Image: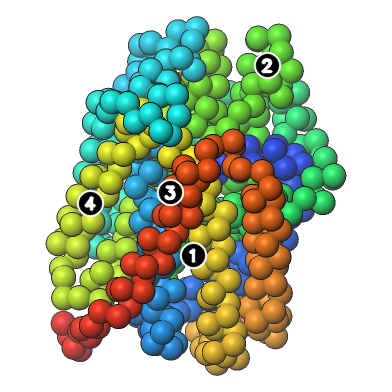
């Protein structure tokens, strides 16, 4: 349940539908399913197996494979930490809008209101002032994360029994309400209409792999950490398949809820559906408030929508932090409570950057690099580590020993050859495209700082942490 909660997050409700639309609509399901089967499921089995077999976090498990591979684990946790810093800010927006939903102060200008809440500046170079409502929401998020993980998996287990099924039920309610609105079917038709020409773009395929990695929590070190808490005889393959397909199913399902509302909004405004479809933050904090304002019982529906976002986001947020905390706790003799308090405090301080007027721009840049490069590279390196140095047959033997559903030679083929080749091709194709057209037209210095600069810092820190002493805990400690 915790792994499903980590997988099903904000990315399912706004990122998947938008990525699908921008990359061929219904045709995007082809690269998405290919990415799920060639990378998602095989790598989830791999990460589950490493954590369960060695009963350690990602750096510790990869260190057991080969000491130098500990760096890959720290790199994964560094990427996860970087994502958590801005993910918590997005949840801060959700806290603010949950309060705003009762009075709906955005009126007829939700985009201007959203920008005023963020105190949005003219670009990444103009820092501007701090948005105090966003800062308060950020503090509420980190306090919630700390409260959930400070006592370890016992409290996590109780929390996910509520926060996993609740957003599914709330999304179902939103879908039912959306389908009763005029224009809903036109929105869904727009969501599913295929544009097969998009399949010729390397960007589309990398977006599919990036979506699978981000949504399934692959490459964060989360799944390895969660699996390390399981008994060594727990089933691996069933857990991996259930988590993967539950996440993919919810993402596809959420798309219907999103586009039924967009179809209604398009008809109400007298514009084509394509003119109201925008990026993730705008979808949740501009398009949805606009549509909800036009509905009966708008305050109730608005509150339910932002509660849905919060319950979706909190599982993913605390799972990322738990992955980092488990790595720190394994590396040094630090208590769960101490590691959680230290990281949550640090995360809050870093997150202040995203509460400034330029925060939305930096969030967009860092998010692009972490998802489209960082997570995919980690998956590639994990395949190399297991496929070429540890041996897939050796790990597969352990997986089959504890699982009801036995995996065969196909898993070896994917981990050793097909998955790294697919990830490598998608990365190279997208880098070529990235160099020819700067991302979203941002200035080069901003892309170097927020993109390649952040990646470089993570790699350096991963190398430093790998070289620091490893204090193994003795049996019974």
Which residue lies under the disc numbered 3? 449
Q: Do the residues labelled 2 and 1 touch (CB within 8 Å)?
A: no
Which residue lies under the disc numbered 2? 266
Q: Disc 2 to disc 1, how far (Cα)?
A: 38 Å
Q: Which mark is residue 196?
A: none
Which residue lies under the disc numbered 4? 346
Query: Looking at the image, what colour scheme do you see?
Result: rainbow
Of residues 138 and 477, which is closer to you in this image?
A: 138
Which of the marked residues, 1 or 4, is nearer the chain's N terminus?
1
Of residues 334 and 120, which is closer to you in this image?
A: 120
Q: Closer to the observer: label 4 or label 3?
A: 3
Q: Which mark is residue 219?
A: 1
Q: Do the residues labelled 2 and 3 touch (CB within 8 Å)?
A: no
Q: Closer to the observer: label 3 or label 1?
A: 3
Q: In this view, does 429 lie above or below 385?
A: above
Decide: few, some or many residues near mark 4? Use Cα within 10 Å; few <14, some 14-19, many ≥20: few
Q: Is residue 132 left or right of residue 11?
A: left
Q: Looking at the picture, how far across and down is residue 419, in whole percent?
A: 66, 72
Quarter holding the N terminus? bottom left
Q: What element carries label 4?
A: helix
Which of the marked residues, 4 or 3, is nearer the chain's N terminus?
4
Q: Are marks 2 and 4 in contact (CB under 8 Å)?
A: no
Q: What element carries label 2?
A: helix
Q: Disc 3 to disc 1, how far (Cα)?
A: 22 Å
């Amino acid at each position: 349940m915790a792994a499903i909660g980590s997988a099903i997050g904000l990315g399912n409700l706004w990122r998947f539908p938008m990525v699908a639309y921008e990359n061929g609509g219904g045709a995007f399901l082809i690269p998405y399913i290919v990415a799920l089967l060639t990378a998602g499921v095989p790598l989830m089995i791999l990460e589950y197996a490493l954590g369960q077999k060695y009963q350690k976090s990602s750096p510790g498990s990869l260190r057991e494979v080969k000491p130098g591979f500990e760096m890959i684990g720290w790199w994964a946790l560094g990427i996860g930490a970087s994502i958590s810093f801005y993910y918590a800010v997005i949840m801060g927006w959700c806290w603010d809008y949950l309060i705003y939903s009762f009075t709906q102060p955005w009126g007829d200008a939700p985009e201007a209101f959203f920008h005023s809440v963020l105190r949005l500046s003219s670009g990444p170079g103009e820092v501007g002032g701090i948005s105090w409502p966003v800062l308060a929401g950020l503090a509420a998020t980190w306090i919630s994360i700390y409260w959930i993980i400070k006592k370890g998996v016992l409290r996590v287990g109780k929390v996910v029994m509520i926060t996993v099924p609740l957003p599914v039920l709330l999304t179902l309610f939103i879908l039912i309400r959306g389908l009763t609105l005029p224009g809903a079917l036109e929105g869904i038709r727009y969501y599913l209409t295929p544009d097969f020409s998009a399949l010729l773009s390397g960007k589309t395929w990398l977006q599919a792999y990036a979506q699978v990695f981000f949504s399934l929590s692959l490459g964060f070190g989360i799944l390895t950490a969660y699996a390390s808490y399981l008994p060594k005889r727990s089933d691996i393959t069933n857990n991996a398949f259930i988590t993967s397909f539950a996440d993919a199913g919810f993402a596809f399902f959420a798309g219907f809820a999103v586009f039924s509302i967009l179809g209604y909004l398009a008809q109400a405004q007298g514009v084509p559906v394509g003119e109201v479809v925008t990026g993730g933050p705008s979808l949740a904090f501009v398009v949805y408030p606009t549509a909800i304002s036009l509905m009966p019982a708008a305050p109730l529906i608005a509150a339910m929508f932002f509660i849905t976002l919060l319950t979706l986001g909190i599982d993913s947020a605390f799972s990322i932090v738990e992955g980092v905390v488990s790595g720190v706790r394994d590396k040094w003799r630090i208590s769960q409570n101490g590691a959680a308090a230290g990281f949550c405090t640090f995360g809050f301080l870093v997150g202040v950057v995203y509460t400034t007027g330029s925060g939305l721009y930096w969030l967009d840049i860092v998010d692009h690099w972490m998802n489209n490069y960082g997570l995919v590279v980690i998956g590639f390196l994990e395949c190399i580590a297991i496929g070429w140095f540890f041996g897939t047959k050796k790990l597969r033997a352990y997986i089959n020993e504890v699982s009801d559903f036995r995996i065969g030679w196909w898993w070896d083929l994917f981990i050793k050859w097909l998955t790294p080749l697919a990830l490598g091709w998608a990365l190279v194709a997208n880098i070529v495209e990235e160099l020819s057209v700067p991302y979203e037209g941002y200035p080069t210095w901003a892309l170097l700082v927020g993109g390649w600069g952040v990646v470089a810092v993570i790699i350096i820190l991963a190398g430093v942490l790998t070289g620091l002493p490893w204090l193994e805990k003795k049996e019974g400690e």
